[in-house]
Amino acid sequence: MIVLGLETSCDETAAAVLRGRADGGADVLAHIVLSQLAEHQDYAGVVPEIAARAHLQNLDPVIRRTMQEAGVALTELDGIAATGGPGLIGGLLVGVMTAKGMAAALDRPFLAINHLEAHALLPRLTDGVQYPYLLLLVSGGHCLLAEVEGLGRCRVLGSTIDDAVGEAFDKVAKMLGLGYPGGPAVERHAADGDAERFAFPRPMAKRAGCDFSFAGLKTAVRTAIENLPPGPVSQRDIADLCASFQAAVGDVLVDRCRNALLTCRDRSTANRVKGSLTDSKVVTALVVAGGVAANSTLRNRLESLSGECELPLVAPPPELCTDNAVMVAWAGLERFRHGDRTPLDFRPRPRWPLDTLAPPARIPEAAA
Ligand code: KG4
Ligand code: ZN
């Protein structure tokens, strides 16, 4: 089965072609991600109107190039999948309408893919992870912990009550004039910094549950900058601020993941060993995905936690951690394999919570 996937939910125009293998995996025949960084850089954030216009302009050529690189003719496609939400409505419309048009013209099935499920399922392609696993999804728009039990079966254990963690990285970078996107710049500067110089708060840490909050941490960084001696912020101050901020984020992520692992264990273990994590093998792995998963310091922190729990830590390759269409094509392939398809009257969804998804549904031919 050969599937084309399209991703246009934010500021990346992406297409990918995957060919399913008999062993349940798939080969990536080609994938292209065209970033709109230059278009949004002046605004230090994504401007929805600009994003939608750029998708409209770029999607057709990106699809054409991806098909050429894959060496696959349109008529060889067995299905077309596009991100149907959550995301910016302008971009979603461009991707979904393109996919529907291709599906109708080629007489092939169409699938609207949930962007969060696409991030969640990718480690099954890259690392062959088995259900159930614990997913920490940390990106510019999302920050959540979920137990992934199967297709359309994600139990959300916690999410952010204010900013996403990537958003916090971007805002700190903006305060320090480090450009956009901020995550990689903050990580670079943090490498030379003293992580203990600024005692930033660890919001939500030590609290029950698995929710996140980053607004207070962001404000603390702002206050620390305001309290520096007058004049330009020195390279030393920037490095120490970034390192202290990143250390606080690391502590919060580890604390929340620890609670999530305990929650998974407590639900399925009759014999509860209070405070011990080694029983948490009820999940097969701790998976970290989303743009922030590219951060190696945070990955190291999570590596220590997973070692403590005797669970593998799985992080997809960095270029597949940020938004891409491989994950959309893969989620599509997994669902197509189960006979799933989306009716052509599907409307893109700016909001589409992960725990409202359903397992694959076979739509009768006549209705599809
Ligand atoms: O998954 P992604 O490409 O898009 C969303 O769905 O949001 O994630 C982008 C986010 C941005 O906020 C960016 O600053 C952050 O991921 N990011 C990082 C790093 N690389 C990207 N944050 C921290 N450290 C990094 N190395
Ligand atoms: Zn994403």
Image (spheres, rainbow, N blue to C red):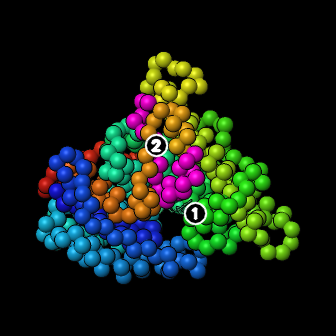
- Choose between 322 and 334: the one closer to the eye: 322
Is the residue 49 above or below the residue 302 in the image?
Answer: below
Q: Residue at x 36, y 66 (%)?
A: 7
**Quarter of the view holding residue 236:** bottom right
Residue 306 vertical placement versus 92 (above, below): above
Secondary structure category for the residue under label 2: strand
Q: Which residues are magenta?
A: 281-301
In space, the residues marked 1 and 2 are separated at their CA atoms by 21 Å
Query: Is residue 156 positioned above or below 333 on the image?
Result: above
Neighbour tally class for label 2: few under 14, some 14-19, many 20 plus, Cα within 10 Å: some
Residue at coordinates 36% horizontally, 79% vertically from top-left?
Answer: 58
For ligand 1, tell me if the residue under mark 2 lies within 8 Å: no
Q: Secondary structure at mark 1?
A: helix
In the rendered image, which quarter is residue 229 located in?
A: bottom right
Q: Say what amino acid the circle numbered 1 marks.
A: Gly
Decide which of 122, 160 is in the foreground and name it: 122
Q: Which residue reaches farthest top?
A: 271
Task: Name the side, left or right, on which 50 lies relative to 204.
Answer: left
Query: Which residue matches tag 2?
Result: 313
Pick the front one: 246 or 191? 191
- Give the mark toward the camera: 1 or 2: 2
User: Which residue does the image show at 33% across and 61% down from the upper left?
Assistant: 326
* Disc assigned to residue 81: none
- Residue projecting furthest to the right: 229
Residue of label 1: 183
The answer to whether residue 299 is left or right of residue 23 is: right
Residue 129 lies, in percent from the top left, at 35, 43
Mark 1: C-beta under 8 Å from nearest atom of ligand 1:
yes
- Give the percent coordinates (x, y) of residue 309: 51, 32
Quadrant in the picture for the N terminus? bottom left
User: Which mark sits nearer the N-terminus, 1 or 2?
Assistant: 1
